[in-house]
Each structure stands twice: as structure tokens, then as C-alpha cells.
Amino acid sequence: MFTIEEINDSGFLPGVRLGYVAYDVCADATKALLSVEHLLSINGSLPVLHDYSEFRPHVKAIIGEYYSLVTVPIAKLLSVYLFPQISAASSAAVLSDRLWYPSFFRVIPSDVHQTEAMAQLMLHFGWNWVGLVSMDDDYGRGAHQSFLKDAAADGVCIAYEEVIPHYLGHENSQQRIMEVARQIQQSDAKVVMVILRDELVKMLFEEMIRLKTSRVWIASNIWSSAPLVMDMQDIDKVGDIYGLRFITGNIAGFHDFFNNLTVNLGVKNELIEEYKRITYCSPSSSKDCSKTRAHSLGPTVAYGERVAVWAIAHALRDLLRCNETSCPGETIFPPYQLVEKLRKVKFSLDGEMKFFNVDGDFEDGYEVVMWVPGDRPIKTIGRYNVRRGQMNIDNSDVIWTMTPNNTKPSSQCSESCKSGHFKKMTNISCCYTCLPCGEGTFSSILMNATNVQMELGLWKDGLNVKHAQKTAQLYILIRVPEMKHQPLPLTLTQRPILGSRAHCPQVGASSKNIQVPPREECLKVCARHYDQPPSVSDRV
């Protein structure tokens, strides 16, 4: 409403005024389809035609829906007519398929990029052992599978996978919530990725509070700034919450516009009444009221819908051949013509270029947000650039409440092996046991999954390796046929020069000094750290 009035007042489409009709479909796909039928109807009915190339409804575009669950059936129906639809919130990856949804657009990235960003967020904080909870609709299934793929590529392992029915009235919803909460409580994974709608998150958190269990929660965009969850009683008890949300911007004058809206006598508008009740909540009201006021109008969807309206306006300006004084093009046009213009539209808004990629998606990126403890305002701590695949986070802004002294929580399947131990791998790449190195072996500091055998009695005179507590550079002589008199320099980087059962030094080839020292110099280096100088060996 606000953006449409802004465009009309600006004269951006000379001689043309935009109008609107709004439907509340209550997040119900059946109601949404019924509303679409009304919008597309001509003379009160939706025509059934053999050829829709001349189908010319009065409505020119549809903006919505919020949930992918509702958007998908709408987009399937509208594809029959090649009727343009733009969503500011539905991010399910399946909607990028131009074969199935040729007239669908969105001013946000696909979930394919969201899960890439989530995996990089795990990497940034050093977590490789996480739980995954999702719901069983198109959005949840797509994001679930995409995250599994991206997590595996980045070396992040999944401790458990749980799926909750998306339908709030499902007979097993509460039972599944309780089962998932117990799984989270019993798991040693301290980080949980949650891909649920806000109502299900609220139910899950209520159970976690009852179980007195806290974790680090990673929120998908669908609930990362949800007032319904923020305003929960005892929300601070669930732990730290981080997440992604779509990039937003300021909408100058929006709140003033909303505050000045009036309801005609005899007309009931619950949305406006609710907004004003929250906005003008008195100091004597409950704590929940004051908290809700801060989060009542999330900027993400409102800004996205503003971008969507401007995209339609720019496409219309091109289609109607508008100049500074008029728009001489035909205003009663078939919808596929506007779809063609939207595919090519490119415009500047708030100093940034906006356009749809070949899949009909925006690639603006995401903001990384943190829920600040206390009254839970949202703070942006970083950004993820979709085009570059790059995550940037300001660690100085990060607050941890689950651990003492604001230290970052650890979520590893296995802790790093100490010096003198090696990894015995399991069937899960992040999980292993640390075992002491055997006598006469060493482990690599980078790839210590195995032990490498080094023969005792390295020197011809029978000298066995002794404990040497000095750090030194040692040139081990290796006979190479092409380099008979050129020993290969290796650097010992662990304190014991060569170890016994208790110490397994790490050995790596020296890349700093390409010049190979003469054999006599090697012997001098060795002699400084042993009781007697070793003899030259033809082998190691």
C-alpha cells in the first residue's frame, strides 16, 4: 500500500495509477487458490480456454505468498496463464525451476544459497557436529537436503536428523516435538540448525525450557526475526540464537504512513488495530507488550514487498513505453508480456542495483543476525555475499551466554588429538578416537589420521633415538638415485626431536630452504643434539 501510493504520487507512470486488492489467506493453500481464482476472474468467472495468449485479466500481477507451502500451489496455477507472481519471503529451492514455475519471481535468494551460508557459519565458529531439525513441507524438505549436501562439502557432520509435521493441527505434532526435544537434550551436539516455521519453533522451545536444556540455535530465515518466538516467556533460557535473514533497507516514511491509517466507521480491520495497540502500548502494560512493540513490524518482508512493487512498476514502465509525460502503451495486455519484461528488468533502489537472475531469483545475500540476550532485539553481526560465496562476521559483536567469560561454545564430535597421539577414524568423518603413537612412529600435525613407521636404529652405528628436549632443525639424509650426493631437508617441528611411545614428533618437508646443505653440515647439526654424532645412513 505504502509503495503503491509512493509510486502514484511520484508520477513514475505518467497517466497511470496503480491499485491493489488484499486477501488474507491465513497461510492456507486452499484459501489462497480460491483468492487467485477471484483475482483472475473475468465477469465473475475464471475462463477455461484452449489458448491463453489472449487472456487479459484486470489484475496485472500478484505479490505473495509468505510461506513456500502456500506459494507453490499458487505458482503452479499461475504458470498455466503465465501470470506474474513475486514473493518477498518464499525461498524454497524448488521454485527456481523455470520449467515448472515459469512466471514466478522472488526478491530474495533461493534456499540453495541459504544452506551454503549456514554451512559457512558453522565453519566460521569451528563447529563440525550439529543437529538438524526441519519440517516436512516443500521448504523444509528442500532446505534439509540442501544443508546436508553443503555441510558434507564443508566438513560439517550431522549428529542427528529430525523432521516435524508442518501442519499445526497434525495429531502427532506435539508428540514429535517432545521426541525431538529429548533427542536434542541427549545429544552431545551443542549446535542445532532449525528449519521450522515460527509456530513450531515456539512449541519446540517451550519443551526445551521445560527440560531445562539450552543450546546454540541456528535459525533459518523463516523464523530468524519472528516476534512470536522473541516474545516468549523465558526465551533467554533456551540459549544463544543466531540466524540468517534477507537483506533489508530503511523505508522512509513507512511508520508515519501506518500511524495515519484510519478505519472507516463500521469497518473492522484487525491488522491496523493490532499495530496501533502494540505501538501505543502504555508503560503500565505487561512486559510482553513492551517487548513486542520493538519487534512488531519486522523490516524484512515489508522491505521485500517494496522491492517487488518497484520491480513491477519498472516492468510496466518498459511495457507501456512510458516517457516523462505519458504511457502510450496498451494497458489491457496479456500477462505473459509483463513476465517477459520482469525477466529483463534492472533498476536502482536505495543505491543498489536490483534484478532477477535466470531462475527468477534475487542474489542480494543475507544478513547474519544475533538475538541479544535480555529483551532479545536483533543485531546484525555480518553478511553473506551470494555471488562471491563469502561470509563476513564481526566477532567483536558476538555474545555467548552458554559458556563462562563469553567464550565460544565448542561443538565437536571429537576433540583434537594431543601431541603423541593419532586419530583412529570411524565411519563418520568428524568422529575418531585418539590413540597413543606406537614406539618408533610419528604423526603428522596436519593429517594425523595414521602413524608413519620410522625404523629404530636409524644410524649405521646402532644408535637408538634418545629423548631430546631441545627444539632443533634436523636434516635427515635420504638417498635419491637422481641426487646421490644431495640430502633432502626435512624439518622436525615438535619439541622432542625423535620420539618414543610417549612422543610422536611431526615431520614435514622444509619449504623455506631449497638449498640442500652438504653432508658434513648435516652431521654437525645432528651432533649438537645427540650424545654422539650419527653416521651417514643410506636409508631412513
Image (tube, rainbow, N blue to C red):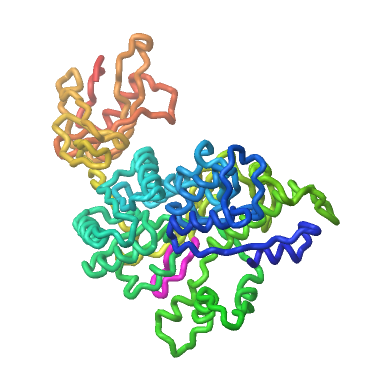
Instruction: Please state, as top left, top right, bottom left or bottom right, where the C terminus lies in the image.
Output: top left
Quarter of the image for residue 151 reads: top left
Q: Is residue 81 visible?
A: yes
Q: Is residue 247 left or right of residue 54?
A: left
Magenta stretch containing residue 234, yes or no? no
Q: Residue 363, position in %: x, y?
A: 56, 46
Residue at image position (40%, 79%) is 288
Q: Is residue 394 visible?
A: no
Mark count = 0
Instruction: Please state, as top left, top right, bottom left or bottom right, where the N terminus lies in the image.
Output: bottom right
Quarter of the image for residue 205 reads: bottom left
Residue at image position (49%, 72%) is 296
Q: Residue 337, position in %: x, y?
A: 68, 43
Q: Is residue 138 left or right of residue 75?
A: left
Residue sitting farthest toward the top: 481
> Relative to residue 183, is residue 263 depicted above or below?
below
> Relative to residue 282, is residue 41 depicted above or below?
above
Q: Residue 193, position in %: x, y?
A: 34, 53
Residue at image position (22%, 54%) is 188
Q: Is residue 344 left or right of residue 94?
A: right
Quarter of the image for residue 446 reads: top left
The magenta segment is 370-380
Residue at image position (50%, 81%) is 277
Magenta stretch containing residue 378, yes or no? yes
Q: Residue 61, position in %: x, y?
A: 62, 53
